[in-house]
């Protein structure tokens, strides 16, 4: 009799723990979704902004460079003004192959993370574990493409247009007299962010499957306790309690 009561209490305690953990997982999942949205904003910003590298007080000229757009200070009839060149729809206006490659890969990263945001709508139709797996892989590939873009971009620093601003010492992976701007640093932070989010998505997917299995197992065990134990003279009902006959 005592053993049966202990078994029922254990099942109820296990089920309560599983339910609480599932609620906590949902809260973590919401935060994961919020930070995924934040990363998508970061990804779009670093793709658009021409602030990956730029002049410093020691620079030969004045200007700054992004993935597909570059701006420099030029003299005109009305004085000096910043002129920006480069069009996303015309790759021939992008300075060099390294910048073009970086543009393509970071652009793919943006497209994939937007697909990840759209895939979150599947939470209304499919198992959360399935959706977390899909989003986890999308985030992983988005991060991988962003890494390639970040690494490819310095390969174009030897371009003559870059050297006009950064000095003749500018070369592959060395900006010369220029410095890294906030967009490039933000892209590096974004890489770490999205890879952590991908790992968290896979973790949530696996944990959700295990916890759901434990919850179903506990419910099955609780249903089986609706029986009469002759030896202990005990009757248990899963929704009420156990009492001696």
Image (cartoon, rainbow, N blue to C red):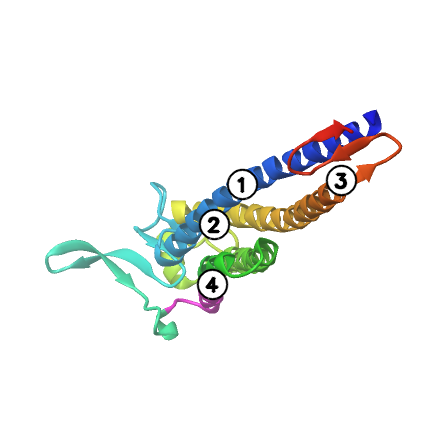
| Residue at mark 1 | 28
Q: Please report whichever mark, 3 or 4, sits nearer to the chain's N-terminal start.
A: 4
Q: In this orientation, which residue lies closer to the viewer: 117 or 61?
A: 117
For the magenta stretch, what is the residue range?
94-107
Q: What element carries label 4?
A: helix
Separation of residues labelled 2 and 4 (CA atoms): 11 Å
Q: Earlier in the sequence, mark 1 or mark 4?
A: 1
Q: Are marks 2 and 4 in contact (CB under 8 Å)?
A: no
Label 1, label 4: how far apart the Cα atoms are = 21 Å
Regarding mark 2 in the picture, which secondary structure is present there?
Answer: helix
Residue 134's x, y, as percent? 58, 60
Residue 45, image x, y percentages: 37, 53
Left or right relative to 133: residue 78:
left
- Which of the marked residues, 2 or 1, is nearer the chain's N terminus? 1
Q: Which of marks 3 and 1 is nearer the N terminus?
A: 1
Alpha carbons under labels 3 and 4: distance apart: 47 Å
- The residue shown at (86%, 30%) is 232
State left or right for residue 125 relative to residue 74: right
**Residue extending farthest right:** 231
Q: Mark 4 points at which residue?
A: 115
Residue 158 inside the magenta-drawn segment? no
Q: In which quarter of the image is the C terminus?
A: top right
Residue 68 picture quarter: bottom left
In this picture, is 86 found above or below 80? below
**SS assignment at label 3:** loop
What residue did someone put label 3 on?
Answer: 225
Closer to us: mark 3 or mark 4?
A: 3
Q: Find disc 2 in the rendering and name its residue.
A: 36
């Amino acid at each position: 009799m005592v053993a049966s009561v202990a078994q029922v209490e254990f099942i109820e305690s296990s089920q309560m723990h599983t339910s609480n953990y599932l609620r906590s997982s949902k809260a973590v999942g919401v935060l994961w979704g919020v930070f995924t949205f934040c990363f998508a904003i970061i990804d779009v910003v670093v793709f658009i902004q021409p602030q990956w590298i730029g002049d410093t007080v020691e620079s030969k000229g004045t200007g700054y460079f992004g993935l597909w757009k570059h701006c420099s200070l030029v003299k005109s009839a009305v004085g000096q003004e910043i002129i920006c060149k480069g069009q996303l729809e015309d790759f021939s206006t992008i300075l060099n192959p390294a910048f073009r490659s970086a543009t393509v890969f970071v652009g793919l990263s943006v497209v994939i993370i937007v697909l990840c945001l759209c895939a979150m709508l599947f939470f209304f139709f499919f198992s959360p574990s399935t959706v977390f797996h899909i989003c986890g892989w999308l985030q992983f590939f988005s991060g991988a493409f962003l890494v390639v873009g970040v690494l490819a971009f310095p390969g174009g620093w030897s371009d003559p247009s870059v050297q006009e601003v950064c000095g003749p010492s500018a070369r592959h992976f060395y900006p010369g007299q220029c410095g890294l701007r906030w967009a490039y640093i933000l892209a590096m932070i974004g890489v770490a962010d999205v890879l952590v989010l991908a790992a968290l998505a896979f973790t949530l997917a696996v944990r959700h499957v295990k916890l759901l299995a434990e919850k179903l197992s506990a419910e099955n065990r609780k249903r089986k306790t609706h029986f009469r134990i002759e030896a202990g003279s005990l009757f248990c009902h899963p929704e009420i309690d156990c009492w001696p006959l």
